Image: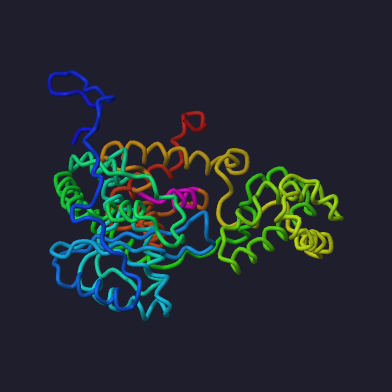
């Protein structure tokens, strides 16, 4: 299927500035009533149960506003039933209990989501687990589409535009504005039709089994919370400016104090204190309230009230008997930019692997990051030791790293070839 801007059969190029299809402004059946109470949620479950076929599912969170990743709205649509909107937080009961009727109905058929990895963890948190899964965004990637957001895919495959605009809103707000509910309902309005259209495209490309393997893996892995990263405080924006262990200890203590406050109040950490303020305080090392509030951000009314808290964190850093090391403890290979100096043979393997995977990606029409995890490739190239059967060794490594069978079949020979030392010339030097 051609991308927008591709030449027409007569060789002309369509005008990319031409207006697209008129956007879908409202759900076909109108905006559904919001199900809030246990009784309303139970009725919504019965309504969904009266329909047939897969469930189009979406969830809205309050990323950037709240510390938690919980769902603040759940949208579900099913043929023969229409759309329901469920408030999973305002029922005044245990969420697992209040939402159990919906979870039980959802356990009877496939779920269709767009970018499922974003929503599965928060849905699992309220007891909702898909028995089967279809991710339309991932399907678009496997099909080789350059633009895989929901609006782009519905326009391309269904000829329908979608009104967007509230995805980054604070969905913990109550009451939810009518225009937000309209937007949320539209997110599932066309998912069932989109699933059929992208499935047909994958079938035409011979990638139906590849997609099935990806969805099964995503279903088994996506409902689990990700393992927390070690030393998360090292992700503080601007930390490269802090060049000594005492300063790093200050970043660590300020970050940890902020994180504890944010978790307790369920507020996004950067709304408590921005990263820039943490870095400035770590560099200045203030010891009095006057010195602290003279720094950017800390002079504001809220930060003045919290001055003793932040000074306490800085004092704890100064007293620390175990200031952090200048560099993060290794958890895998170093950044590839350092390889040529530290392990040039690994750098050569990685360069060859990337080149081979790029050619494979172009040939099969799948992005390289979907062919195989880039992290797996880096680890393989860094740790590689000669093996009697390189293809078998690569297969074992990728299998242990949870690469799917379709991925291994494609990339095993490519990576095995890239991992071999370059042939030598007659004088014994590498070509």
Left or right: where does residue 275 sit relative to residue 332? right
The x and y percentages for residue 391 are 35, 52
The x and y percentages for residue 268 are 56, 58
The reply to whether the magenta stretch includes residue 375 is yes
The x and y percentages for residue 252 are 70, 58
Q: Is residue 308 above or below residue 4?
A: below
- Identify the residue shown where x is 16% and y is 52%: 196
The x and y percentages for residue 225 are 45, 66
Q: Nearer the viewer, residue 425 or 159?
A: 159
Q: Main secondary structure of the magenta part?
A: helix
Q: Which colour scheme is used?
A: rainbow
- Identify the residue shown where x is 38% and y is 78%: 96
- Identify the residue shown where x is 40% and y is 63%: 400
Q: How many labels does the image show?
A: 0
The reply to whether the magenta stretch includes residue 270 is no
- Identify the residue shown where x is 60% and y is 69%: 264
| Magenta extent | 371-381
Q: Which of 306 and 365 is in front in this view?
A: 306
Q: In this view, does 261 lie above or below 422?
A: below
Quadrant, the N terminus: top left
The picture quadrant where one finds residue 359 is top left
Left or right: where does residue 14 sit relative to residue 231? left
The picture quadrant where one finds residue 322 is bottom right
């Amino acid at each position: 299927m051609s991308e927008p801007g591709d030449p027409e059969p007569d060789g002309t190029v369509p005008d990319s500035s031409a207006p697209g299809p008129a956007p879908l402004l409202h759900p076909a059946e109108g905006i559904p009533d919001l199900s809030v109470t246990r009784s309303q949620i139970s009725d919504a479950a019965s309504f969904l149960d009266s329909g047939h076929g897969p469930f189009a599912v979406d969830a809205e969170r309050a990323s950037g506003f709240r510390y938690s990743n919980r769902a603040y709205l759940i949208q579900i649509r099913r043929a023969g039933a229409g759309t329901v909107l469920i408030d999973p937080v305002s029922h005044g009961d245990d969420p697992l209990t209040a939402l159990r009727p919906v979870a039980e109905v959802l356990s009877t058929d496939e779920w269709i989501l767009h970018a499922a990895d974003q929503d599965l963890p928060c849905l699992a948190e309220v007891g909702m687990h898909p028995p089967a899964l279809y991710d339309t965004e991932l399907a678009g990637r496997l099909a080789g589409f350059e633009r895989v957001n929901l609006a782009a895919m519905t326009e391309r495959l269904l000829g329908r535009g979608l009104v967007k605009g509230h995805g980054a809103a604070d969905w913990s707000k109550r009451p939810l504005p009518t225009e937000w509910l309209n937007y949320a309902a539209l997110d599932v309005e066309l998912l069932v039709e989109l699933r059929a259209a992208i499935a047909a495209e994958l079938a035409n490309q011979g990638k139906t089994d590849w997609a099935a393997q990806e969805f099964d893996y995503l279903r088994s892995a996506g409902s689990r919370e990700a393992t927390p990263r070690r030393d998360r405080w090292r992700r503080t924006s601007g930390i490269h400016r802090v060049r000594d262990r005492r300063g790093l200890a200050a970043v660590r203590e300020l970050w940890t104090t902020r994180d504890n406050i944010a978790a307790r109040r369920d507020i996004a950490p950067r709304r408590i204190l921005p990263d820039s303020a943490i870095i400035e305080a770590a560099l200045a090392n203030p010891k009095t309230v006057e010195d602290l509030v003279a720094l950017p951000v800390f002079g504001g009314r809220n930060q003045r009230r919290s001055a003793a808290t932040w000074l306490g964190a800085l004092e704890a850093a100064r007293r620390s008997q175990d200031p952090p090391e200048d560099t993060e403890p290794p958890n895998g290979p170093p950044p590839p930019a350092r390889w040529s100096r530290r392990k040039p043979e690994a750098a050569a393997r990685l360069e060859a692997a990337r080149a081979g995977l790029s050619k494979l990606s172009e040939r099969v029409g799948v992005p390289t990051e979907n062919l195989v995890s880039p992290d797996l490739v880096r680890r393989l190239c860094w740790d590689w030791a000669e093996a009697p059967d390189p293809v078998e060794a690569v297969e074992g490594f990728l299998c242990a790293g949870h690469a799917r069978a379709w991925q291994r079949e494609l990339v095993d020979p490519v990576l095995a070839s890239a991992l071999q030392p370059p042939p030598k010339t007659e004088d014994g030097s590498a070509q």
